[in-house]
Image (cartoon, grey):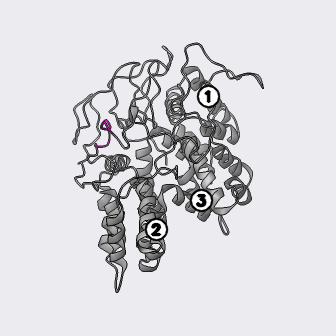
Amino acid sequence: MSYPPPQGGYPPQGGYQQPPPGQYPPQGYPPHQGYGAPPPQGPPQGYGQPQGYPPQGQYGQPPQQHGYPPQAPPQGHSPYPQQQQQSYPPPSHSPYPQGQPPYGAPPPQGQYPPQPQGQYPPPHQGQYPPQQHHQQPPYGAPQAPYGAPPPQPYGAPPTMPTPPSPGYDPNQLAHVDMSGAADALRKAMKGFGTDESTLIRVLAHMTPLEIPTLKQTYNQRHHRSLESDIESECSGYFGFALLAILRGPLQHDVWCLNDALKGAGTKESLLDDVLIGRSNADIRAIKSAYQQKYRRSLESDVKADLSAKTERMYLMILAATRQEESAPVYPQAVDADVSELHRATEAKTGTEQLTVCSILTNRSDGQIRAIAQAYEHKYRRALESVIRSEFAGHMEDALVRMVRSGADKAMRDAIGLEDCMSGPGTKDERLVHRVVAVHWDRQHAAQVKGAYKHRYKKDLISRIRGETSGDYEKLLVAMLE
């Protein structure tokens, strides 16, 4: 089944940061708008509007300021629905913003944590994971001879590395008082019976930086392990989901990777959920944490569990050599990638699978978005449809996820959640992993709910209520409210 979204397209998605003004060449692809900004009116310069991808705004033009209407729009306006904002207030100590914009609306100012240009804070000197960032050459620029100093194009600003996501630097903690939350959790589990509603109320909206502080405070005040107490007091998928929250995003990723690779067989879908579409900084943090926890490298476990071209593809991902999101998008390089993808797939008998893997594992989200748009314009066929017809099995699923990650992460995650609930039975473990992953970023969670409603014409939370029950249902719903 091909992925092109319903006619009208989805809003373009930005990375963690936007390139500095003037970084794009005058005749190049225009700078992409911030994630969630409504698509501008009119077709982009140089390309007709393909099916399934949003039109690109002209260089230098600000995004439009209006949101998406809730009902069928008049001609010439975006068809995105207005997602009702959630009124649930986060705890007073939470650094996340209280109001969430609807799917397709511009993100609010002052996002967590408040930094210049809305970026996440870079790790302090000496913080984990240690990295040496070298300036990346511009996407599509000619390669210098071996041993030559990196090129410095006249007037070209340096490519800024994308910082780790919140929770992916263990030295970053929330400096807030967690004694009240720790005491409430202990009281809920002390004595006969368990107060599950208190566990849900306290844990469902904890931020990535608050989790380590909460666990440390619980241990200091009660001389007990919070995770051990939860494990002994809660069972089933309710307990499974609570433990996923308490691990925090980085350690839960590490836990999922070990679960995917241990024992007989490999859970490739779990590998894809954790590794595909991630920044170089997040991949490096995951590899370092995996090494520290299991005393072996993630690459060695992948090599031991996989083989042939599938192994090579995952090792390309783990190399963490993607272009950064601040890297410019050059039309010449996009056209070269489009031609190479066509030559390796539709233009010949047999598929050069590693050529396709090499391109998609090394490009930024913005570059993949431009490649997919240009491919459909040039060859009148969606890139995802080409991958579906030329690949099969796990490699097909992984490459499709790469294209979807570049096109629209909110829609990618909305489809992933529906996949957990469609068909006979509910894939509960996978549903827990995906809901927990989405809930760490409350703005993204709001966008996923809007994308789900746009695609499936129903409410995500109502869908989850129909597939789950009891405290397990209440916890998943609370995480998304």
Query: Which comes before the other along the chain, label 2 or label 3?
Result: 2
- Please, what is the three-letter code of the amino acid marked with disc 1? Gln
Q: Is 102 one of the magenta-colored residues? A: yes
* Residue 12 pos. (x, y %): 41, 34
Q: Can you tell which of label 3 and label 1 is closer to the viewer?
A: 1
Q: Quadrant of residue 43?
A: top left
Label 2 packing within 10 angstroms: few (<14), some (14-19), many (20+): some
Residues in magenta, as a range: 101-110
Near mark 1 (Cα within 10 A), the count class, few <14, some 14-19 or many ≥20, is some
Q: Which residue is mark 3?
A: 257
Q: What is the three-letter code of the residue carrying label 3?
A: Leu
Lower position in the chain sequence, tag 1 or tag 2 = 1
Please name the predominant secondary structure of the magenta segment in the image. loop
Q: What is the distance, in whole Å, between disc 3 and disc 1 at their CAs?
A: 30 Å
Q: CA distance from mark 2 to mark 3?
A: 16 Å
* Label of residue 135 in the image: 1
